[in-house]
């Protein structure tokens, strides 16, 4: 439905409705409402909250929800009558009441006082909450039903969750058992996966926003701070959330922003809180909480022992770097989930710890898969299927919440993981826990590597390079980079498969490399000497003169619209007059390099070096200088004076030590060995990561400004 004008109203309109019903008082509802009391800092940071714009008021701030008066006992809207029932709870913004339609069906009415919507910003925020929540349909998300308004309030009609929230559960029970938390985490992950697949970040996941339906299934609610990303790579910059649950990148990330991973972080906080009894970064004041979050200052108290598997999962989720946090799919693969897993949560959960001790291992696995299945964690659905499910789900929820069960059973597809047959048959392939643990470790290592690469990528900014004005030349360079990068990746794959037999190893050919260089680009250009002793100057206008060492000859190389580069051969004795100045510069550099620079390698011209080679591009990065030679060799001179060249399309690696010893190896062999033989100090692995990053960067640049 459309929400009507929802105009900002002034104070005079406040409470003007006749027959005001007295609002049930907090006192008698405190138990039910459960304001995360033992989570001291629960007031969420909401940049749009009008309250934040009134700093002058010294007196204790009244919650905006206090402006919301109890709705009349009969609410009439668009021909439909709703009967107000009892008070359900109160948030910072809204009060929630039970509400019954003519057919007797019961809903929750989240009621927002129009008096609290004073600014356009707040109005937009409420509309956004409605819009986002309305677009959600998942068994573990509070179902949005409808919304309407009267003179005083805006009503958001929701699926009723009559059994409180995880917050209330924890308040009553103090701490939960691991099997229960496994079940809850699975349902929450299902809902988060669904939200993220629709590019929605919730941004306020906390125990108080996750409710129980009549069957003690979890439902995520309160989309008040949710955001939809226009695309996967968009970042959000608003600082919002609830102190205990805020992700570090939200606190630090004024510049880099945040994304989906903030919900994963909050999941980690909840997991810890449920198992330990209080959130991991709890402190007396908000600033201390923030300081603790920013340096990931948390530990597992000895007096509240939890399983090692649980600790591993929590530690991994609470990674400072969002890239290092496991994805939802990776989370579901954690060994921790292979422990005792209940088929459902009994209604006695609020008062006592359920006893799940007698569930056998195989049955636990079946329960786990069932729970994943019901939370839609197993199927990757087509949008068609999602639409169908959404329709089914809404119609089932409208007739009765209990129909959820039926909905689950009637889903139009069969879980592929469930083969027909008895329980024992279904999961004969009981997972090898050790293998699973190793997989978890591998996934963690991969994430850490990914995070390191992301840091490198950010730091890898070219400080100088020769500008190439020909599109075709840029494309040639990009494709060479791509080819070599692929070669390296292939060698890595070969290494993982156990290496190559001798007969398939590439033949060793020392490449031509740059043995000396001088960057004089603020005046003439970039000059270099190759291992063949040829001397080249890459002039600032993009042309190159390459003077050959063993003949009185030189090449003049310039750009060509179709070929990329064209080279003309000259005898020194027949040099065209317009090139004499160029040759003087070459001479100047040759003398300079001879007098001042030492040659970095003993390589010389080999028989297989039939063609002359020139430098197509040099790029100076902080940690290394990268040379791209015309025969497809890439050379990397690192700041620590170790040098490496990658040739033969990524198959060969040449190492040049700081003391100028040089050797060439098949890359796959060095990977097998783990380092350059005899030179462990060269940090080969680290350097290869940088090399790949440099190649990756250069393989995407294809256009000129
Ligand atoms: P706010 O946006 O003001 O934080 P919430 O969405 O958190 O509001 O709702 C406020 C309170 O209303 C909750 O803490 C809970 O007690 C109650 N509530 C919210 N949604 C439901 C629901 N679907 N069923 C039952 N109670 C609900």
Image (cartoon, rainbow, N blue to C red):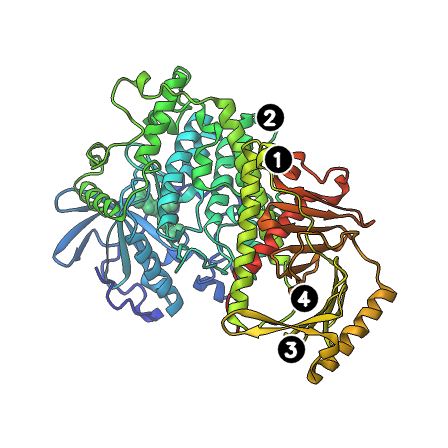
Above or below, comparing residue 145 to residue 699 in the picture? above
Q: Position of residue 688 (x, y in %)?
A: 64, 47
* Mark carried by residue 303: 2
How dense is the environment of label 4, judged by Cα within 10 Å: few (below 14), some, or many (20 and up)? few
Q: Position of residue 216 (x, y in %)?
A: 32, 32
Q: Position of residue 77 (x, y in %)?
A: 17, 58
* Residue at image mark 1: 299
Assign the N terminus to one quadrant of the image. bottom left
Q: Secondary structure at mark 2?
A: loop
Instruction: Check the image and name the residue furthest to the bottom.
Output: 577
Q: Is residue 579 left or right of residue 315?
A: right
Secondary element under disc 1, as helix, strand or loop, is: loop
**Residue at x-position 28% and y-position 24%:** 419
Residue where numbered disc 4 is placed: 463
Which mark lies nearer to you, 4 or 2? 4
Q: Position of residue 668 (x, y in %)?
A: 61, 39
The number of callouts visible is 4
């Amino acid at each position: 439905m459309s929400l009507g004008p929802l105009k900002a109203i002034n104070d005079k309109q406040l409470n003007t409705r006749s027959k005001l019903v007295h609002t049930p008082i907090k006192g008698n509802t405190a138990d039910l409402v459960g304001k995360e009391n033992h989570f001291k800092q629960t007031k969420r940071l909401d940049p749009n909250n009008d309250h934040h714009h009134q700093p002058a008021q010294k007196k204790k701030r009244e919650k905006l929800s206090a402006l919301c008066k109890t709705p009349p006992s009969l609410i009439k809207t668009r021909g439909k009558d709703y009967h107000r029932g009892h008070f359900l709870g109160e948030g910072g913004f809204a009060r929630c009441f039970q509400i019954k339609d003519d057919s007797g069906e019961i809903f929750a009415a989240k009621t927002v006082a129009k008096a609290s919507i004073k600014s356009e910003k707040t109005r937009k925020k409420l509309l956004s909450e409605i819009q986002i929540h309305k677009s959600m349909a998942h068994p573990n998300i509070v179902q949005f039903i409808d919304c309407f308004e009267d003179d005083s309030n805006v009503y958001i009609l929701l699926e009723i969750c009559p059994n409180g929230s995880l917050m209330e559960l924890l308040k009553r029970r103090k701490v939960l058992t691991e099997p229960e938390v496994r079940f809850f985490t699975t349902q929450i992950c299902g809902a988060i996966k669904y939200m993220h697949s629709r590019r929605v970040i919730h941004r306020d996941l906390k125990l108080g926003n996750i409710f129980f339906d009549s069957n003690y299934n979890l439902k995520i609610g309160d989309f008040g701070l949710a955001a939809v990303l226009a695309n996967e790579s968009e970042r959000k910059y608003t600082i919002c959330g609830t102190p205990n649950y805020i992700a570090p990148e939200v606190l630090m990330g004024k510049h880099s922003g945040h994304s989906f991973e903030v919900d994963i972080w909050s999941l980690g906080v909840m997991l810890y809180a449920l198992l330990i009894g209080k959130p991991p970064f709890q402190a007396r004041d908000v600033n201390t909480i923030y300081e603790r979050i920013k340096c990931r200052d948390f530990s597992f108290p000895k007096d509240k022992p939890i399983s090692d598997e649980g600790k591993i999962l929590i530690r991994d989720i609470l990674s400072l770097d969002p890239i290092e946090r496991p994805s939802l799919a990776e989370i579901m693969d954690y060994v921790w989930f292979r422990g005792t897993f209940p088929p459902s949560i009994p209604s006695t959960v609020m008062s006592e710890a359920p006893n799940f001790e007698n569930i056998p291992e195989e049955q636990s696995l079946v329960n786990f898969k069932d729970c994943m299945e019901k939370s839609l964690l197993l199927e990757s659905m087509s949008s068609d299927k999602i639409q169908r499910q959404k329709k089914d789900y809404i119609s089932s929820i409208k007739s009765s919440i209990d129909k959820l069960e039926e909905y689950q059973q009637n889903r139009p597809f069969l879980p592929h993981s469930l083969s027909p047959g008895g329980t024992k048959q279904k999961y004969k392939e009981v997972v090898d826990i050790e293998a699973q643990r190793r997989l978890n470790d591998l996934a963690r290592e991969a994430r850490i590597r990914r995070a390191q690469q992301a840091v490198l990528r950010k730091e890898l900014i070219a400080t100088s390079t020769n500008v190439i004005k020909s599109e075709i030349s840029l494309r040639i360079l990009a494709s060479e980079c791509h080819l070599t990068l692929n070669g390296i990746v292939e060698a890595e794959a070969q290494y993982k498969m156990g290496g190559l037999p001798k007969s398939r190893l590439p033949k060793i050919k020392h490449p031509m490399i740059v043995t000396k260089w001088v960057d004089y680009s603020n005046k003439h250009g970039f000059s270099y000497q190759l291992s063949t002793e040829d001397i080249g100057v890459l002039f600032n206008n993009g042309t190159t003169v390459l003077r050959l060492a063993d003949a009185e000859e030189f090449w003049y190389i310039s750009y060509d619209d179709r070929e990329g580069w064209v080279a003309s051969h000259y005898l020194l004795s027949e040099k065209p007059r317009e090139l004499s100045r160029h040759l003087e510069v070459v001479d100047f550099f040759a003398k300079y390099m001879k007098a001042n620079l030492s040659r970095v390698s003993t390589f010389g011209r080999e028989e297989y070096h039939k063609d002359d080679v020139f430098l197509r591009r040099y790029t100076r990065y902080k940690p290394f200088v990268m040379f791209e030679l015309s025969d497809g060799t890439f050379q990397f001179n690192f700041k620590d004076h170790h040098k490496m060249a990658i040739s033969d399309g990524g198959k060969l690696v040449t190492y040049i030590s700081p003391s100028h010893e040089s050797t060439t190896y098949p890359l796959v062999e060095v990977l097998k060995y783990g380092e350059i033989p005899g030179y462990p100090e060269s940090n080969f692995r680290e350097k290869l990561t940088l090399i790949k990053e440099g190649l990756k960067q250069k393989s995407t640049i294809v256009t000129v400004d």
